[in-house]
Amino acid sequence: MMEDFIDSNMWKNRGSSVIFDKIMLGPLLNQGALVSLRTALGWLSRWPVDLASANPHAAPGCRTVLIAGLDTVLEVVPPDQAVALVREDVRRIVREFQDRWPEYGLVFGLNTPGARMWEDPASEQVYFVTRDKQRICLSTELWNGSSVTDMGRLLRTDQQARQQVCGGYYAPRS
């Protein structure tokens, strides 16, 4: 059973996550935590010496790096190439980021409605569904499937609707 993290902020301070809820992403954007996927891919050949140089626009005390552009890659690159990029390069970013800065959170922000994320209750896998209905298993490709037992839904309380809303998925450590 996938764990629910309700109104939790731990995803901002450790581990990695995929967030598609604009309300959850808003504070990170306001803190200047944003870097492009292209920039993060560049780290693979030469890692910054510290997090401040990796993310120079982040507000002091910000403990999160928000990477934008993963959803664009998943949409525009042919599915087999997108899967290979996520499996080989993006997964490596997650692993090396966590090894270098274990007390910081790595967030992949998606500019995609939550309806484009699909969770299979039987296997507890999380999929990204492209516009042309291709399903890419993020829980396996991004987190190597090893984090599925620890992976959980990030829920926030929608005060207006008076219900819990899923805003993304979190893996404490992949």
Image (tube, grey):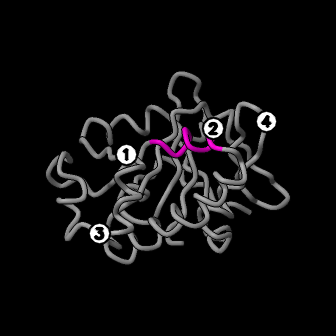
Q: Residue at x 47, y 61 (%)?
A: 16
Q: Earlier in the sequence, mark 4 or mark 2?
A: 2
Is 46 placed left or right of 162 in the picture? Answer: left
**Cα separation between marks 1 and 4:** 25 Å
Q: Which residue was labeled with disc 3?
A: 47
Q: Whole-percent x and y of residue 130?
A: 70, 37
Position of 42 relative to 136 (above/below): below
Res 144 quadrant in image: bottom right
Q: Nearer the viewer, residue 159 or 72?
A: 72
Position of 134 relative to 143 (above/below): above
Q: Are marks 2 and 3 in contact (CB under 8 Å)?
A: no
Q: Which residue was labeled with disc 2?
A: 75
- The amino acid pointed to by label 3 is Trp
Q: Are marks 3 and 4 in contact (CB under 8 Å)?
A: no
Q: Secondary structure at mark 2?
A: helix
Q: Residue furthest right?
A: 122
- The amino acid pointed to by label 4 is Lys
Res 151 quadrant in image: bottom right
Q: Are marks 1 and 4 in contact (CB under 8 Å)?
A: no
**Cα separation between marks 1 and 2:** 16 Å
Magenta-colored span: 69-77
- The amino acid pointed to by label 2 is Glu
